Image (tube, coloured by chain):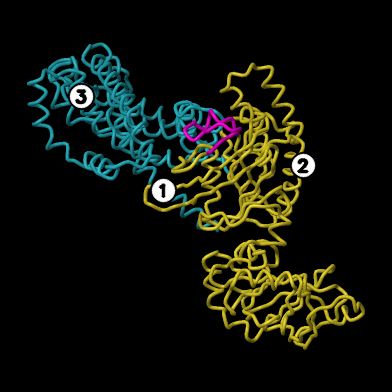
Chain colours: A cyan, B yellow
Amino acid sequence: MRRRKLAWGGADLVVLAWVAFPVWWIVALSFKDPSTITDGSFWPTKWTLQNYEGIFKTSQFLLALRNSIGIAVISTVVAVVFASLAAYAIARLRFPGKKVLIGVSLLIAMFPQISLVTPLFNIERVIGLFNTWGGLIIPYIAFGLPFAIYTLAAFFREIPWELEKAAKVDGATPMQAFVRVVAPLAAPGVATSAILVFVVTWNEFLLAISLTSTTASRTVPAALAFFTGASQFQNPIGSIAAAAVIITIPIVFFVLFFQRRIIAGLTSGAVKG
Amino acid sequence: MSTITLDHVTKRFPDGAVAVNDLSLDIGDSEFCILVGPSGCGKSTTLNMIAGLEDISDGELRIDGQVVNDKAPKDRDIAMVFQTYALYPHMTVRENMAFALKLAKVPREVINQKVEEAARILDLVPHLDRKPANLSGGQRQRVAMGRAIVRNPKAFLMDEPLSNLDAKLRVQMRTEVSRLQRRLGTTTVYVTHDQTEAMTLGDRVAVLRGGFLQQFGTPKELYENPANLFVAGFIGSPAMNFMAASLEDNHLRSPLGEVPLSDRLRRALEAANVERQVIMGIRPEHFEDAALVASQPERAGVFFSATIDVVESMGSDVYVYFSLEGARANAAELEELARESGSAELSSAAETVVARLDAATAVREGEQARLWFDPAKVQVFDPRSGRNLCLAV
């Protein structure tokens, strides 16, 4: 028994180290003084906040951060709202073309994005979306929707249909039944899919670097590639590391904050357990 | 306080399946009406149509004389109790019960008063601020009932409300439901597959099978004068015994011996103009141990001998099981009927006969016993249509 526990503990430690090492490495880099940044030490020998101060001093990072937040939030909200409606229809209604719809959305999710970069680039240049928020938000919604529809449809299916029937008999209109009974119960699903979409758009690099050209719409992952050091001759690794740590924070925060809700599963107790 | 009328109501699903076929029921004010039948007989579909959760393909549904076919559930003023209770899990017991009233924009004081009153009736006062997840099965069931009664609706619709409770609680709640319905006097339509619930709760019972109404009457009518083989086999526990018999001049030749026909029965059979092969049905309680009958010479009847397979003593009564030679003659047909109805009792009854004897009986397992039955209680059915021929008069 004890040996087993030890074995499991050991395995856990290995996994933890494996996962946490790159994260620690980037955190350590972000605190290293420019002179020691290439020393390869695990623990920073000379701690400094210079990298963080540096990125917040220039507008380059702050503008990118603003773009990232704006674009990710708008894409997420729009995608989740539309996905809720679509997922509800998929979970509850029978309509012609339902299988096709599911199939097409799966297809979009699996489509290799690299093959879309050139056509998107050309289209957006022609219609004036290139290097705008809209130019990124629209494809992000397109790629976020399938994920969101999938997770939400699974959650809607879990909600007993009889609850809606009960609400209808209790005098609710279909809209009231959805808003007052179904939606609150699907809240964990909405949170889950919102996080999924947010993380994907927040981290997206390929489209961000291809469809933007200035700080007007460049998001943080793309902007990192354009970082320079404090001077032209300084290595920007420290700044990049600091920026990477900063943009990881919201993701960690989201997951920790919603984790309990996601796991809790609100529907317990609706029907005979 | 309302009447519900189903006027030649039919439910046809888009795939062509007919769930309910030309069903006509007249449910009176304050009546407790039961829809009973095996699964797939259309009873739940019928209830959903009354609630407005399913469209009516054909025919008319009237509540209080008003056609409601095209009214949404919310405009019908009916309350429903679901088999799974369907409590809103994110709301407390109080909010669950108040939900309908809140939607109807009833003033808050009135809502509170009604909810408190319902909670008192249902013994839910200490639980008002708990969520359904923290309640026991019986408490959840009562919340579901409470949600229905606070509204004071035109009718209660109940879809197997007790089938998720364990046996003891079910019997307890059955009495509770019955008492509640009498007290409130609200017209109630209650769906169940359990014939015991149907018999004990209903003012009148509608037996459905494959979407067709078999019979609609008081429990006593269904039990004593079943319209056909199906009702006879479905109502009553243990089920009625069926056996092949043939019609002779003035008696019935059966595996239990010759059964004299009463004048009434003979006239009925003549009027029905049936063939010689019939199915004879007799309920378990119409048998008796011959030794116990002999002391009462006024009880004329048919005596026969059988080898007893199983004896089950219930204390107050003794059930004995015996097999009948010759009863199998028509068994194939009976079994087909049994398969159709989905009733296992019916199929086993084709070969084994159950008799309920007085507790004083001395019959033993594996021994020959002399038994008696009352020929006046025998029912005779047409094997082809299943019709009860005794009712032809």
Q: Are marks 2 and 3 in contact (CB under 8 Å)?
A: no
Which of these two is toward me, B373 or A172?
Answer: B373
Say above or below: B309 vs A100. below
Distance between mark 2 and mark 3 Cα atoms: 66 Å
From this viewpoint, is residue A46 visible? Answer: no
> Picture coordinates of residue B46 (x, y %)?
53, 46
- Secondary structure at badge 3 equals helix
Q: Residues within 10 Å of mark 1 (few under 14, many from 20)?
A: some
Residue type at tag 1: Phe
**Label 1's element?**
loop
Q: CA distance from mark 3 to mark 1?
A: 46 Å
Residue at which label 3 appears: A136
Magenta segment range? B61-78
> Considering depth in this image, is B287 or B137 the residue closer to the camera?
B287
Q: Chain of mark 2?
A: B
Which mark is on residue B13?
1
Q: Quadrant of the N terminus of chain B?
A: top right
